[in-house]
Amino acid sequence: MKLWNSYKNSSFILKMTIGFVLGILVGVIVGPPAEVLKPLGTILINLLSMIATPVVFLTVVLAVNKMNPKELGRTGGKLILYYGTTTAAAVLIGLGLALWINPGESLSLPSVSVDEPANPSFSDVLLNIVPSNLFTAFSSGNLMAILFIAIIVGFTISNMNFSNDEKMKRYGAYLQELFEAGDALFFKILSGILLYAPIGIFAIAASTFGTQGWGTFTSLLKFTGVFYLGIILLWAFIYTGILRIFKVPVRHFYAQTREAFTTAFFTSSSIATLPVAMESAKKAGISDKIVNFSLPLGAVFNSDGGALRMGASIVFAANVTGANFSLMDLVTIVIVGTLLSIGTAGIPAAGLVTLAAVLTLFDLPLEIVALIAGVDALIGMGGTASNVVGDIIGAAVVDKSEKKATHASQLAVDSE
């Protein structure tokens, strides 16, 4: 019991780090047999994914219920502008560093063929948002459809709460209390899941490094180095710069959100990390209604880490194949990369889809995807952490902006 209490009360970051480091050591020492531990890691991802869908639905319903349509449109517009700006910056950083360092010059293509993944059309994306079956949307984990349903339900409850019909108003109050109770329930479950998290992280690290080892990593070390240097620049200049512009205390922000980006780094799943990210964002002082609306939206539409990887990957592909890019090609990569990263962030294998789409655009071989897959696990960790931090910074920026607008409106009313 004493040992359990010591484990339970110790730092979450410390537990996760110890689990990760021990996992790497076991993986490197034991080798491929360490894959026997993989199910323990899969259990963690499944547990986090299991509560992610209801958490997204419940929190968005509650957020929309507290917003009027004007606020919702204004907040959504600000978030999309922020996503476009940071995603474009990430593509440029990845592109610029790769052009400078030139990873991939000494590598050759693997002797495998890779099928081009289907890049969804606009109509496919639109139809995917509006589900034909309510239960199918939840069972398939279609986050865009779940967001759509949550917004409709939230507006409906809000209308019921402000109805002139007393019976309808009473039902609205019951529903709101039900959703609030459900939200509290799943965050309580989350606290239990996080106690298991270090064990799952240990298993993920052991199975990943056991099967891939350091051989693949060292052969693609230059490319991996370019990517992580880009991540450092993205955080140090773009993210920190935005926080300073909007007068968000930088040290306090990163201290309060470290559980979110640490969990994202170790699990490599933005969706699975979403409940932890929402808790961290609230600790950082961001208002509940902004967190509940913006973070699920960011998990679906924002992918700074994927955009940075894509920018670096295109130059890597060109170096492997000996292709040359014109200035116009580079501009096209930035524009297309930004749009694709925003448009496909919420779909499975989003990084694969965006990379394959741009490779196809420039007639570069899709076998590059197989080559990069050797270090995909390592790259995915940093990319996911960046996605989550970017989402929370977007929420912080919008929250500051909304509070400033509300304060200005109040001053205008007081002066009249």
Image (tube, rainbow, N blue to C red):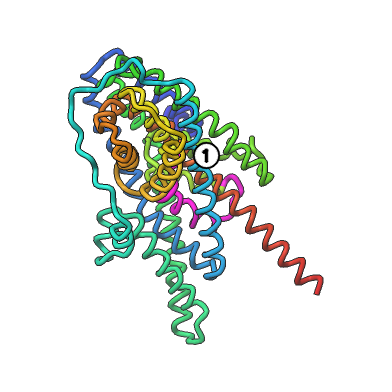
Nearer-the-camera pick, 182 or 204: 204
Q: Residue at x 29, y 39 (%)?
A: 360
Magenta part of the chain? 283-304
**Residue 209 position within the rendered picture, expressed as x and y whole percent measured from the top left:** 31, 21
- Residue sitting at the far right: 415
**Residue 238 position within the rendered picture, expressed as x and y whole percent measured from the top left:** 58, 37
Question: Can residue 191 be seen from the camera position used here?
Answer: no
The crowd level at tag 1 (other Cα within 10 Å; few <14, some 14-19, many 20+) is some
Question: Can residue 321 be seen from the camera position used here?
Answer: yes
Above or below for 292 versus 265:
below
Question: Which residue is tagged 1?
Answer: 89
Quadrant occupied by the N terminus: top left
Amino acid tagged 1: Ala
Q: Residue at x 28, y 29 (%)?
A: 368
Q: Residue at x 33, y 61 (%)?
A: 126
- Residue sitting at the far bottom: 165
Q: Secondary structure at mark 1?
A: helix
Above or below for 235 versus 337:
above
Nearer-the-camera pick, 103 or 245: 103
Nearer-the-camera pick, 100 or 186: 100
Instruction: Report whether 30 appears left or right of 346.
Output: left
Asked which quadrant contains residue 212, the reply is top left
**Residue 61 position within the rendered picture, expressed as x and y whole percent measured from the top left:** 44, 64
Q: Main secondary structure of the magenta part?
A: helix
Whether the magenta-drawn stretch holds residue 40 is answered as no
